[in-house]
Image (cartoon, helix red, strand yellow):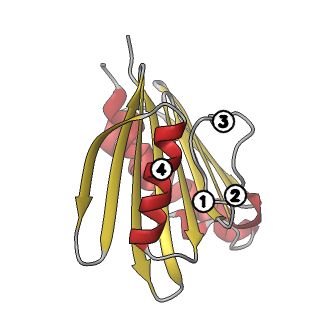
Amino acid sequence: MPGRGKLWVAWAAVTALAVAMGCGRSREKTAEKALEKMIEAQTGGKASVDLSQGRMTVKTDDGELTAATGAAAKIPEDFPKDVFVPADASVRMVSRMPNTMMVWMAVRPSPAQVCQRIGTEMATRGWEKEMSMETDESQSLGFKKQDRRVLYTATRDEEGTQVTVVISREEG
């Protein structure tokens, strides 16, 4: 899809600079301008960035990307009901762009325990497992259902397990 790279640059900027959100209005304005210049330099097009109250919106000619962190980060109302979220999950960040949503959350169980539960839950919800990968520090599971894909990655850190869920819809 033409122009999709512009949104991916914006998404990378959002995730890399999410810590700038919630740092006070003057710092938000400085971060907004820096992000706009970075995105414009990478894409050759205009970009508009708005940071406020733990939320970020990036607009380019190719579309819009949004992200939320901290208290503003919640499972979105339009999050697919057939995609499993652990009951004890603490949402840390949510970002979205056309056809893709990403949710970062923290849970208590180990990566192996949480991935076992994810596998069971997704199967009962009609998802077909497409991939499974395990390293010393993390586990990933990929699923497909109709025109949608879900990728879970669970990684252990000092605070517990960080789970990233990426939900995408194939363009057709």
| Mark 2 in CB contact with mark 3 (< 8 angstroms) | no
Q: Position of residue 157 (x, y in %)?
A: 43, 83
Mark 4 vs mark 2, CA separation in Å = 26 Å
> Which is nearer the eye, 31 or 131?
131
Left or right placement of residue 150 versus residue 51 in this view: left
Q: Quadrant of residue 147?
A: top left
Q: Looking at the image, which residue is at 72% across and 54% down?
A: 74
Q: Could you say whether the residue bearing mark 4 is in a helix, strand or loop?
A: helix
Q: Position of residue 110 (x, y in %)?
A: 45, 76
Reading the image, the residue beneath label 2 is 73
Front position among marks 4 and 2: 4
Reading the image, the residue beneath label 4 is 120
Quarter in which the C terminus is drawn: top left
In this picture, is 4 found above or below 31?
above
Front position among marks 1 and 3: 3
Tag shown at residue 93? 1
Residue type of the residue flagged with mark 4? Thr
Circle 1 Cα neighbour tier, 10 Å, few/some/many (<14 / 14–19 / ≥20):
many
Can I make out residue 153 in this image?
yes
Residue type of the residue flagged with mark 2? Ala
- Mark earlier in primary sequence (1, 2): 2
